Amino acid sequence: MDEQTNNEQLIDNPFVPKEGLISAQDPIALNIEDKKLIEIIDEWVDENKKKFNSEYDLDTRRKENEKYYFGRQLKEKDKKGEVKTYQSRYINNEIWESEAHLKPLALSKLPDFKVTTTNEMDESKQSADDLTEVVNTDMKSRKRREVLGLGFKHNPIYFIGVIKAIWDYQKNDYDFIIVHPDNIIFDFYASDKESTEMRVVAEYLPITPKEVLMRFPDKKEKFLEEFRKEKNINTEDIPEKAMASKIKIMEVWFTWFEQNGDKWERIEGTLWKFNKVMLKKGKNPYFDYSGEKRLFTYKDEKKEELPLEQLQMMAMGNEMMGVQSQQVFRNYFKDPQKPYILIGYEQWGKTPIDETSRVEQEIPLQNSLDKRGQQVDEMIDRARGKHIWSKLGGLKAEDLEELDMSDPEVDMLVDEDVNKVHEFIPGEQPSAQMFKDKQDSADKIRAKAGVQAITGEIQTDVATTNQIAREANFTRADDLVEDTINYASEKMAQWAMQFIKLFYTEEHLKEAHGADGSIIYKKLHRDLVDDGMEVVIKSSSTDKLRAEKLAKEAAQLQMIDPLSYYEDVGLTDPKGRTKRLIDYMADPLSYSMKHVEGLETTPQQVNALNGQGSAEALQAIMMLTQGQQPPLPQQVDQGYIQTLSNFLESGEFAALPPELQQMILEFAAQVSAMFDQTQGQMGAMGQMQPQVPQAPQTPQQPTPQSTAGVPQIRQGAPNGSPRNL
């Protein structure tokens, strides 16, 4: 898989030239003799490989870590015949299990980034906000998470994890890929994991000869000559099978010092070579060395670039007063950077790789755990005991071979006294101390990994002890994630800014996630990245984990508001969630209609409950109770009639003054007549419709009573006065 991945990386590698030579005027041309540079690189690679293996035994230790991580230690012994057929093959791979707990913990909440700017203009602030949303969405995407996760898993196995920033010319966008640590050689004398501070970083790239010819066509003759030598091919035509075979070329990023007079210039370069053939060399292509000339003028003490019309006028020879020029460089980084982001944790200031790792420290305990587990497994197998038979009973060896003493259906008949012929020796059971020793080894492995209290593997009856253990492990996790995931994420975000500022010459449509979780798209151009912009971590993954943990504890004590809770646990749209929670607690029915049914306004909700027209009827009733005559509705439906009838039989209507009651009854009669005209001879609601009560003659007249428990609205008399039918 690694070989295929590296091959795909090479095919899409932005640094591999498509065709042609770098001209002498090219700003990234490198004026160093090929033969001399190759000799220096080869000597450096050999020296550093020998140093890492002689002083650190790096290759052997990496293979050992890999073997135990994947639980392959017993397979090697099996192949060598060191394990008997009857011996236990017991393995309890606690190393793998501990790492399986750590990775999701480290990647569960990736850090939040913020792009800041020193420019106080609203346009620059908006650009910074847009970049913040795009960078955060990109760094938390599945693709970036997979790269970070694999680099994190590589670190304790190979003592380093390697992420590479590339510009993909085919996709016209930046990307981040994993480089397997076996395929890369670092500067042994570098004191830390900052790749830019190393003199040289060399990477082996698996590729086929055909792909080399495609990427480096100008070096065809020299490459094929070198390839024939390596494969001992004496014919002019190289077999197709050989052309499709895998070879490795080397990509090298190096620091070179060139003398200019009495001064020395530091040059960051890169090259690709196959054995002694230089395929390509030049300065670091991820940096703007020449810049571009920009014309500007000052208006109201603010610097403004000249508009296109004025530029065209100047191009035609027209001079303009107050115009100044400035060389603009499209760089986020101050200096060229080697595109390798290294994930390390146990460095000691001696080399760029870790001195040791948690996996290497856990291997002796894993051996002890496996050994004790095998002993327990074998003792349990032997616990069934042994049957010993005497020849006095007439049994022969071949008879015993046919007997299955574990079969409950097997019975034995002997001539002599059974006590003289047969004896059973019971097997020894594993002791409690053996089980305890086995458990202790497993606990110590989890303790070294720092996962036992976080995952709940170890608990005591004392709550304070458990809390101290959890806090201790979160502190370890904080430090581990800060030095690995947060560090790598921040470097990736910085590289994203460099690529945007250098290569986004055309608008790129980038996906971003809004505060409510919705997907939006931002148009990015390199002009949006000001010189004063900086991308920084707003909140780290461990900050968010701790905030989530504290929020949940505070919620159990009912000492946190819902908005703060949703923000701390990292849920999308915290304000919207808070609003919906308050609506639900205040009125579940309104909540259902508003947030489930999508009925936002009160009239919509009233109509949903009582039918169409209910809201209009309520408005009419409100005007009538205030002594105002409402306009007759354009259309009277079931909801309008039902709402009006409900009001007429309510205590609120009975408490109104007689004159208002009379006005309302007259209005109800007109509405009932309109409804009857629409519905025909069926009446307002047939036999179930409410009836309009007789208007009271005096204030002391009793309030209207419903007929059969339900008042009915009927059509009024011709003069508009209500009547009962």
Image (cartoon, grey):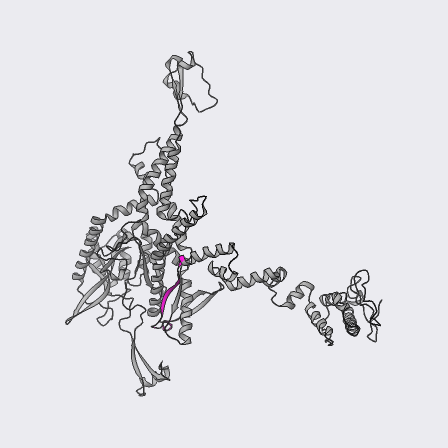
Magenta segment boundaries in residue numbering = 523-542
Point out residue 691 in the picture as x, y percentages from the top left corner.
Answer: 80, 66
Residue 245 appearing in the image: no
Location of residue 575 with respect to 4 vertically, above or below: below
Instruction: Choose between 563 and 359: the one closer to the eye.
Output: 563
Q: Specify the quadrant of the image occupied by residue 627.
A: bottom right
Location of residue 200 with respect to 310 vertically, above or below: above
Quarter that holds the C terminus = bottom right
Residue 27 appearing in the image: yes
Instruction: Choose between 682 and 140: the one closer to the eye.
Output: 140
Q: Residue furthest top?
A: 416
Point out residue 89 in the picture as x, y percentages from the top left corner.
Answer: 36, 35
Q: Specify the quadrant of the image occupied by residue 441.
A: top left
Is residue 282 within the magenta segment? no
Location of residue 234 with respect to 329 vertically, above or below: above
Point out residue 201 in the picture as x, y percentages from the top left corner.
Answer: 25, 58
Instruction: Choose between 651 and 640: the one closer to the eye.
Output: 651
- Which residue is drawn at the image coordinates 31% and 63% (left, top)? 14
Q: Residue furthest left?
A: 262
- Which residue is drawn at the image coordinates 52% and 60% (left, top)? 562
Is residue 538 within the magenta segment? yes
Q: Specify the quadrant of the image occupied by residue 660.
A: bottom right
Location of residue 49 with respect to 412 vertically, above or below: below
Number of disc labels? 0
Point out residue 315 in the picture as x, y percentages from the top left corner.
Answer: 31, 84
- Which residue is drawn at the image coordinates 45% and 17% (left, top)? 412
